[in-house]
Amino acid sequence: MLDAGVQFAADARREGRRLLIHCEHGIGRSATVALCVMVARGADPLTALRQAKDARALVSPSPAQYDAWSRWIRRRAPAAPVPDFEAFKAVAYRHLKAGA
């Protein structure tokens, strides 16, 4: 399904259409698709996550969504560095830290 979302985004971009990616809460599912789109467009994965998190503080894909994203990167963007889960969670779950 991530491949389909990335392809849909690529088609929209090629056709000059505006694209919004969202799910019910905009926390995990849409964020995972958006991260794949960003990486497909050449972004470094961890930089993409930081940008998404900065734009929407609630972005926090689940561990299962992290696994899907990291597998997608390995398959579709093998030159991109896959962040380990510790680096991922330091950004994705930073809103959970005390005083944050």
Image (cartoon, rainbow, N blue to C red):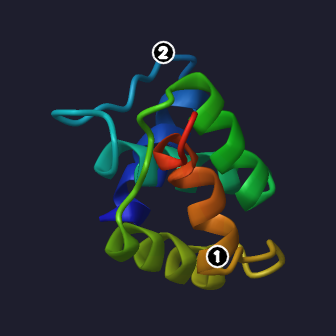
Q: Residue at x 56, y 77 (%)?
A: 70
Report the residue that reaches farthest toward the front.
98
* Number of numbered discs overlaid on the protein picture: 2
Q: Residues within 10 Å of mark 2 (few under 14, many from 20)?
A: few
The residue that label 1 is drawn on is 86
Among the 4 quarters of the image, the one containing residue 83: bottom right
The amino acid type found where label 2 is placed reads: Arg
Among the 4 quarters of the image, the one containing residue 3: bottom left
Distance Cα–Cα, label 2 vs label 1: 34 Å
The reply, left or right, for residue 27 in relation to residue 17 is: left
Q: Is residue 11 above or below residue 35?
A: above
| Residue nearer the viewer, 86 or 41 | 86
| Residue nearer the viewer, 67 or 85 | 85
Name the spot of residue 43 as percent of width and height, x first.
Answer: 78, 50
Name the spot of residue 72 as percent of width and height, x first.
Answer: 52, 75
Q: Residues within 10 Å of mark 1 (few under 14, many from 20)?
A: few
Q: Quadrant of the N terminus?
A: bottom left
First reached walking from the N terminus: tag 2 or tag 1:
2
Among the 4 quarters of the image, the one containing residue 78: bottom right
Q: Residue at x 57, y 34 (%)?
A: 99
What SS does tag 2 mark?
Answer: loop
Q: Residue at x 53, y 44 (%)?
A: 98
What SS does tag 1 mark?
Answer: helix
The amino acid type found where label 1 is placed reads: Glu
Q: Residue at x 49, y 44 (%)?
A: 34
Residue mark closest to the camera, 2 vs 1: 1
Tag on residue 22?
none
Kindly check if marks 2 and 1 are in contact, taking CB atoms under 8 A apart as contact.
Answer: no
Name the spot of residue 59 as percent of width and height, x first.
Answer: 44, 40
Name the spot of residue 33 as percent of width and height, x first.
Answer: 43, 51
Q: Is residue 71 above or below residue 2?
A: below
Tag on residue 18?
2
